[in-house]
Image (cartoon, grey):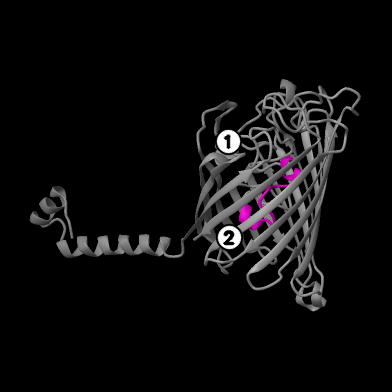
Amino acid sequence: MKLNKWTVGLASAGVVSLASVAYAEEQAMSQVLTAVSSTTLSGYVDTSAIWKPGDGNAALPGRAFDGVGKLDSFNLNVVGLTLEKPLGEDQWAAGYRMDLLFGPDAVGYNPSYFGTTQIGGGDFGIKQAYVNLRVPVGNGLDFKMGTFNTIIGYESFESYLNPNFSRSYGWQLEPTQHTGLLANYRLSEAVSVAGGIADTWVAGINRQNAHGPGGTTTESMKAYMTSLTITAPDSWGFLSGSALYGGVVNGFSGNTKNTTSTYVGLSMQTGVEGLSVGAAYDYRNNGANTVVVGQNWAYAIAGYVTYQATEKWKLSFRGDLTQGSDGTFYDRTSPGSSGQNRLASLTLTADYALWANVVSRAEFRWDHSVSGDSPYGGEATSPGGDKNAVTLAANLIYKF
């Protein structure tokens, strides 16, 4: 037991006893250990090697995290660390979660704001940080308050959670992060709902829109979100675990109008051992766009097939199609084109679990411009040259 001089002096004067001081310290330490004993530490290290035949610095519109800056090179993508105390079974359960990102892919999550002024930056980001609470209403109403993931989307930022290494076009159309309050409630074994309010549609911690889009209001505007999930229970036979999901997010995203994102997703078991399928639809109205002034739009459709061939081998296929106003993914450059961005891709990913705790996979992806443009190739600042793009990638992720 280490005592400061003030405590020793009080003990010498008979004001306090050393035994009581020791007991108080033991109690304080016990409370600290109790508070952190249920906290878990987990994370991952995500690396890749990506090769594009031809121009190694070619623009790849519609791609996230695996385009310019990573082509024809070995890459550290991101390091993720998670501290979490999950909600228990208590009626008044409490917990928290904090997801920290380090590395180049953290850039989308690193801005923080004081009002409307950005003060963050660098290869560090806070992806999630929230307090989690349960209120004993009905089946239990769970709340998150802080910064949390968006409630829509088939794919996750963490690539190891996705069937494929590269992200879909739909990922580019969706919000990623909100700062606000989110409530979840399970209506039954099969049905759950969520609803929330946040500062903005777009990512950025404490990012406020004090006077609405274009400064048209005196009262601050917020983003609103809701979702519905239907999950097949065990009584549904081979469909057990299949899920149908729908959600809407509406709010300010840094342009002159509110952005609305609508999403519907399906993941389904097929009854064939090891085979599952999925589908996703995204529609975004008035999203970020550097070309179209006023109303713009974009949608994306993706289909997924995953086959667990053996205990170690897994194959995942994705077909992807997107269409949107000019400027959604790139500025139209080819004469005689439709004036819209239209892209399609096919992705095949082979995953072989050779090492414990390691995701090791190889991926082939083909992207194609359906609109007649030639947006692939050239430098990032001057897209144009090819109607097709092929990339090969190797992805190694260690999870702990």
Residue type at tag 1: Asn
Measuring 62% from the left and 57% from the top, which residue is drawn there? 361
**81 displayed left or right of 327:** left
Q: Say above or below: 227 vs 370.
A: below
Crowd around label 2: few <14 · some 14–19 · many ≥20 (10 Å): some
Image height check: is 361 above or below 332? below
Question: Could you say which quadrant of the image residue 331 lies in?
Answer: top right
Residue 378: % across, % down: 70, 28
Q: Is residue 165 magenta?
A: yes
On whether residue 88 falls in the magenta region, the answer is no
Quadrant including the N terminus:
bottom left
Mark carried by residue 359? 2
Which span of residues is magenta-colored? Answer: 159-172
Q: Amino acid at mark 2?
A: Val
Judge left or right: residue 281 versus residue 204: right
Label whose residue precedes the other's in the sequence (2 or 1): 1
Q: Nearer the viewer, residue 326 or 7?
A: 326
Residue at coordinates 80% horizontally, 74% vertically from top-left? Answer: 272
- Nearest to the eye among marks 2 and 1: give it: 2
Relative image position of residue 323 (x, y in whole percent): 85, 38
